[in-house]
Every structure is written in structure tokens, then in C-alpha cells.
Amino acid sequence: MAHTGHQTMRRVLRREIAGTIGLLTDEDDFRAMRRYRSFTFDDHTTYLRQVEALLRTRSAQGNHTTVALFDPADYAEFCAGTGLDPDIPSSRTRFTAELAATGPTVPYEGQPLADLLPALVDEAVRQATWEYAANRLARLGTCTLCGEDLGRAAFARASALLVRILDTAPPGDRHLVCSVSGTPETLTCVLYADQDTDGTTPLDEAETLEFTTVLALGLAAHSPGGLVMRTTAPGTPDRVYGWRLRGHGLQPLTAGEVFDAYCTDIESGDLVSPESNVDYSTPPDLGEEPLPGHHH
């Protein structure tokens, strides 16, 4: 009887262990892992099907699973740095555990793998964008005239601007996009700031940090860029307005400039039909009160 009791307790404990699966999202990464003899899959489609079946089984058993983006180059670097043999399964397990703490992850909640894969890739892009922008900000150093930390000052200014943008926005769901060019490639980040029925605007902490960091980099580096807000509320047309990054601040776009931006295909430059029930407008006044940050 005692043995049966122990088995039951182990089953209960297994249900309370959160697991992480490292996923090879694309064909190239999958091929890179096939050089290890202990990696026994030989077809990416079959591999994805088996992963999905495992996720469904764990979910049916009441187990929570997080899916992490498994990058073979990062894995090889991890093994070299820790002295682990990359061609044994336990090394992959160690790396996956590391990913669970520091890498891009998405919780499995029963969604098809076809939906989970792009969400995981998006999360990886978000994290890479934030890390790049944060590193660039940190490397700006201090002002030669006053000794102020330029990156920290730009972040304080960007934070204050974001607060003003949200405070002046019409009621409803808010969708902000910030893009900054002038770096090796354009950085783009998104912030969803949906308003609750009581008027409060709960923000995702990671999204807000990334958005503020990218905006701060654009302001500090005087990079070309822009910020666009779209608000949605029942019974009214969606409202779209925005600003261009100018110096240490934001310059309002005219309604015509916002219309042109929304109705031009980014890739080809061709005009596209405007959306119906959308009001392209000038942004609200953000106020004259001085913003924090560096002023030289």
C-alpha cells in the first residue's frame, strides 16, 4: 500500500512541475541540430507534429508547459562556455532550462502550433529589439558639459512622453507603434494600452519597457522615426494620429501626413485604399510643461 501511495504522490508532484520545451522553429535551425548524432529527428515537419502531440498530452494531464525558442548557434556557444558536450540530451536540457529563465518564451495554452510559432518568433524579435536598444542607450555615456547620463535622461524623457500620450488619448483601446531608423535596421515596437471599464489603463510591463527604450534611443540619437497611435471605441470611428521624432521630442503629424503613411505600401511605395470608418487626424496637444531629460 505504501508503494502505491508513493506512486500517487509522485503523479501529483509531476502535475505541479512546470516544464519548458526548446523549439526549433525553422528548417535551417533544424538542419543545424541534425549534425549531433543524439538528435534523432530527420524531418522538420514530423518533429513539429511530435512536439505538438507532446504539448497536447501534457496539457491534457494538467501540466503547464512553456515553449522557448531554441537557437543552435546560442546552444553551441552555451556548451562551449560551460564545458558541456553538445551531443548529449542532458546538455540540451540544461540549455533549455537556461532559456526558460532568460530567453524568449510563450506559454502553451492549447493553441495550434501554427499560431504558437509566429508568437514565439515575435517574442524573440521583441526581446532582441529591446536588448539592442538598451545596449545602444547604455553606450551613449555622459554629457561632456554636465556629466549627466545620456541614456538615463533619454529614458526619463521617453517615459514622460508616453504618460502624456496616454493621458491625452481618447477613451477606448489604444495601439501604439514606434519606429526608429538610422540604425543598421529599423527598430519597431508595439504597445497595447487598452482601457478598462473603470478608465484605468493596465500596461504590460515588458512591452512598456521595450517601447520606452526604443523611443528613448530615437530621441537620444536624434534618429529619424515616428510614433503612431490608433484608438478604438464602440460606436465611433477608429482615430489615427501620430508624431515624427524631432530633436529631443515629438513633432505632430498633420492629418494628411498620417493618411499618406497609412495608405502607402511600405515595400512598394504604391498607394493602397484607405480603411473605412477611420478618422485620420492631428494628435492632441501634449502640453507645454517642460519634460525631464537632458537639455544641452
Image (spheres, helix red, strand yellow):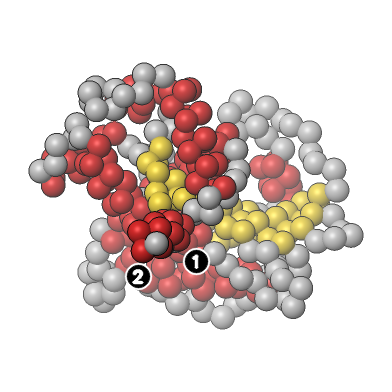
Instruction: Return the residue nearer the eye: 41 or 269.
Output: 41
**Residue, x 51% and y 28% (percent of image)?**
49
The x and y percentages for residue 257 are 68, 47
Instruction: Return the residue nearer the eye: 247 or 33.
Output: 33
Q: Give the quarter of the figure containing the N terminus.
A: bottom left
Q: Is residue 220 above or below residue 271?
A: below
User: Which residue bears the numbered disc 2?
Assistant: 152
Instruction: Return the residue nearer the eye: 79 or 223.
Output: 79
Q: Give the quarter of the figure containing the C terminus.
A: bottom left
Q: Nearer the viewer, mark 1 or mark 2?
A: 1
Task: Check residue 205 in the rendering and tell me which mark sits there, or answer none.
Answer: 1
**Residue, x 45% and y 50% (percent of image)?**
66
**Residue, x 36% and y 53% (percent of image)?**
100
- Residue 241 horizontal side relative to residue 225, left or right: right
**Residue, x 52% and y 42% (percent of image)?**
57
The x and y percentages for residue 81 are 13, 45
- Residue 200 horizontal side relative to residue 16, left or right: right
Q: Quadrant of residue 92?
A: top left
> Quick check: marks 1 and 2 in contact, CB under 8 Å?
no
- Amino acid type, callout 2: Arg
In this figure, what is the number of numbered marks?
2
Can the viewer see residue 167? yes
Instruction: Return the residue nearer the eye: 182 or 88.
Output: 88
Can the viewer see residue 180? no
Label 1: how many residues lie within 10 Å, few (<14), some (14-19) or many (20+)? few
- Residue 77 horizontal side relative to residue 225, left or right: left
Could you give the CA–CA distance between mark 1 and mark 2, rounded to whole angstroms?
18 Å
